[in-house]
């Protein structure tokens, strides 16, 4: 599960130019600044996860804590998917809960028995908690990423 802050290809273009320049310090600075620009979003996503109503089947305190711990920033500066993402990473979840971030967000179907009765099953409704948390802060993050791109462009020129 991720929320990607994208631009119109400037990030890919700058990343490509940095690879061609082969300046490791500048590439590291670029990744560090992108991570710093997205950092304010992580607490917002974690707070959104912790505030999932407890009436939901998946809102047990242990699950909310696991989802919040699995939230991280992912910066990719190579390939077609270059970008900055706030990700609730299923790989960071306990072994039996790896697919839960996508189920909580509604990307995958989540069925469960009603009060443990295996003969009566229901679908859990979609609740886009992660995206709603970032949607309000997204414009600020986009402006921060744009500033980073402008600064790195000046250093390259």
Image (cartoon, rainbow, N blue to C red):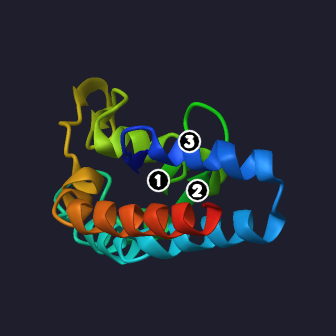
Residue corresponding to mark 3: 13
User: Residue 40: x, y in percent?
Assistant: 37, 77
Q: Is residue 39 above or below residue 14?
A: below
Q: Which mark is residue 142?
A: none
Q: What is the tally of numbered marks visible in this picture?
A: 3
* Residue sitting nearer the eye, 114 or 40: 40
Residue corresponding to mark 1: 85
For residue 82, side relative to residue 112 (left or right): right
Q: Residue at x 20, y 38 (%)?
A: 126
Measured in 3D between alpha carbons, the distance from the residue under mark 3 to the one under mark 2, in whole angstroms, is 15 Å
Q: Is residue 90 above or below residue 118?
A: below
Residue corresponding to mark 2: 75
Residues at circles 2 and 1 in contact by the CB criterion of under 8 Å = yes
Q: Residue at x 18, y 36 (%)?
A: 125
User: Residue 54: x, y in percent?
Assistant: 21, 65
User: Residue 19: x, y in percent?
Assistant: 76, 47
Query: How many neighbours does mark 3 have within 10 angstroms: few (below 14), some (14-19), or many (20 or more)?
Result: some
Q: Earlier in the sequence, mark 2 or mark 1?
A: 2
Residue at the top extreme?
119
* Residue sitting nearer the eye, 46 or 66: 46
Q: Residue at x 53, y 60 (%)?
A: 153
For residue 57, side relative to residue 89 (left or right): left
Q: Residue at x 32, y 53 (%)?
A: 58
Measured in 3D between alpha carbons, the distance from the residue under mark 3 to the one under mark 1, in whole angstroms, is 18 Å
């Amino acid at each position: 599960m991720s929320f990607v802050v994208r631009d119109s290809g400037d990030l890919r273009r700058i990343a490509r130019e940095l690879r061609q320049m082969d300046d490791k310090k500048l590439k590291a600075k670029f990744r560090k600044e992108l991570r710093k620009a997205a950092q304010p979003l992580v607490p917002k996503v974690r707070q959104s996860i912790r505030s999932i109503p407890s009436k939901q089947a998946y809102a047990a305190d242990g699950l909310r804590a696991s989802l919040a711990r699995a939230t991280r920033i992912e910066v990719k500066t190579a390939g077609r998917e270059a970008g900055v993402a706030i990700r609730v990473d299923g790989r960071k979840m306990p072994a039996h809960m790896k697919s839960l971030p996508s189920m909580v967000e509604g990307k995958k179907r989540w069925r469960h028995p009603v009060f443990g009765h295996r003969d009566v099953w229901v679908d859990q409704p979609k609740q886009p908690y992660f995206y709603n948390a970032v949607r309000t802060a997204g414009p600020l993050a986009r402006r921060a990423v744009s500033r980073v791109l402008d600064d790195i462009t000046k250093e390259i020129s």
